[in-house]
Amino acid sequence: MELENIVFDALDPRLLGMFWQDLLGCSLLTDSAEGFETRLFIENGPTLDFCFQPVEHPAAEHQRIRLRLNGGSVPESVMTTALGLGASRPVNEESCEPGLDLRDPQDNAFGIAEESSDQPTSGAVAAITIESASPARDAEFWAWLSGWDQMKSGTSPTLQHPSGRGFRMEFIEQRSAKSASKNRIHLDVRLSPGDDPDRVAAEITTRGGAELHPDWGTLPWRVYQDPSGNEFCVLPAPSRSKE
């Protein structure tokens, strides 16, 4: 399995997708009524597709998954670019992580921080941060799920792509317990050829996750929660004809 997508619920997928595409320098994949997709490519590292799916009402509650962008030595420059593309500053909200807090055009929080000297090849995104009831436990769960490596960190349990390049996944203490509402941002992983979907489902449950059965009709993927209740999808293995 491998991490493939970060998915945003969006009132206007194209508006939100264009913001992130322009800010991160991504490459357009799809622009249709079904959604907007754009790709972040890290040379010799991971590829992450940003997917923006239409919803009538994105979750308004506390956001549990955030992006933290690299600002290099001048994070204010990235902040100025983001503001010029339609981002805004938060109003009277305390940050739960380091960096400069901003909101994208549909009120998703994100941060900007200086690029660490020990991570010179991370690219435009420094990290995806995930709120967790037990960061060490969930880092182990996601390491198995994504195939990423656990690494030493002085701040929080952290995963990195096996290449040693690209953004990291960081697990931070949650500010409040996960509610029954779906997260407005979630991750997708894709099965590798030869993976048995039912065995993967059983292993997810054994490791503390749970399969969900939402009333969304017939889907080609399966929906789960990690041990802290954060939703994610497991996509089918690519067909042999897919390049």
Image (cartoon, rainbow, N blue to C red):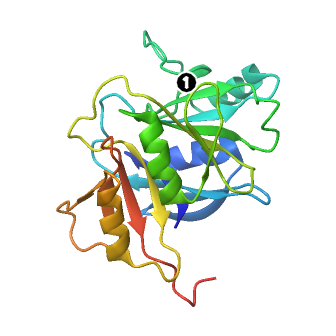
User: Left or right: 19 with respect to 77?
Assistant: left
Vertical arrangement, residue 106 with respect to residue 83, above or below: below
Residue situated in front as seen by the camera: 129 or 156: 156
Vertical arrangement, residue 23 with respect to residue 72, above or below: below
User: Left or right: 201 with respect to 119?
Assistant: left
Q: Residue at x 74, y 43 (%)?
A: 122
Within 10 Å of disc 1 (Cα), the crowding (few <14, some 14-19, many 20+) is many
Vertical arrangement, residue 155 with respect to residue 149, above or below: above
Q: Which quadrant holds residue 57? A: top left
Vertical arrangement, residue 165 with respect to residue 107, above or below: below
Task: Give the total number of marks visible in the rendering.
Answer: 1
Residue 48 spot, x, y in % from top left: 61, 56
Kindly identify which residue carries mark 1.
Answer: 102
The amino acid type, in three-letter code, at marker 1 is Leu
Residue situated in front as seen by the camera: 222 or 93: 222
- Element marked by disc 1: strand
Q: Residue at x 70, y 23 (%)?
A: 80
User: Left or right: 175 with respect to 191?
Assistant: left
